[in-house]
Image (cartoon, rainbow, N blue to C red):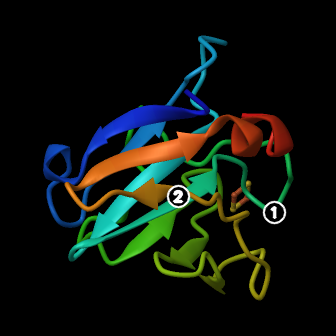
């Protein structure tokens, strides 16, 4: 198997995010967000400092309305679909998008080569 199963789309409510620590390093290295029936994934590093993870608490990647990804450190807001910073100290920068795959039966997968490439 050249990929890892991250769960099913139905494991996420619309507007829900989850962090993943697939190498058991003790901290999530990337996260997946559901918006409608689409899934998006990003490296859990804020472009403001390039070494800071976003959530104040595990899986808390979104603002109260689940409209944007938020960095708890200084309040930057990011577009869920493209990771672009819309407001905050890293305005105009983007989160690093991680390619994931959703199969026809709505399972979510990440390739081992992606894990290696993104150092997840
Ligand atoms: S570290 Fe994310 S907004 Fe400052």
Circles 1 and 2, Cβ within 8 Å, touching? The answer is no
Residue annotated with mark 2: 41
Q: Residues within 10 Å of mark 1 (few under 14, many from 20)?
A: some
Figure quadrant of the N terminus: top right
Can I make out residue 22 in this image?
yes
Q: In the rendered view, would you say 8 is above or below 20?
A: below
Residue annotated with mark 1: 48
- Residue 92 lies left or right of residue 25; in this view the side is right
Secondary element at tag 2: strand
Percent coordinates x, y for residue 52 in the rendering: 75, 43
Q: Residue at x 26, y 65 (%)?
A: 64
Can I make out residue 57 in this image?
no
Q: In which quarter of the image is ligand 1?
A: bottom right
Figure quadrant of the C terminus: top right
Q: Residue furthest front?
A: 1
Q: Which residue is drawn at 60% across and 22% down?
A: 27
Q: Residues within 10 Å of mark 2 (few under 14, many from 20)?
A: many
Camera-side residue of 69 and 43: 43
Residue 56, numbered circle: none
Percent coordinates x, y for residue 12 in the rendering: 20, 50
Percent coordinates x, y for residue 71 in the rendering: 57, 58
Q: Residue at x 77, y 88 (%)?
A: 92
Q: In the rendered view, would you say 108 is above or below 99?
A: above
Is the C-beta of the residue carrying label 1 under 8 Å from the nearest atom of ligand 1? yes
């Amino acid at each position: 198997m050249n990929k890892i199963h991250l769960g099913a789309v139905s494991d996420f409510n619309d507007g829900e995010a989850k962090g993943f620590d697939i190498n058991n390093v003790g901290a999530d290295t990337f996260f997946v967000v559901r918006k409608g029936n689409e899934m998006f994934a990003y490296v859990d590093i804020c472009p403001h400092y390039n070494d800071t993870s976003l959530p104040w608490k595990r899986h808390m990647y979104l603002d109260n309305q689940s409209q944007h990804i938020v960095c708890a450190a200084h309040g930057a807001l990011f577009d869920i679909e493209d990771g672009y910073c819309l407001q905050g100290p890293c305005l105009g920068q983007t989160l690093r998008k991680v390619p994931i795959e959703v199969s026809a039966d709505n399972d979510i997968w990440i390739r081992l080569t992606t894990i290696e490439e993104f150092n997840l």
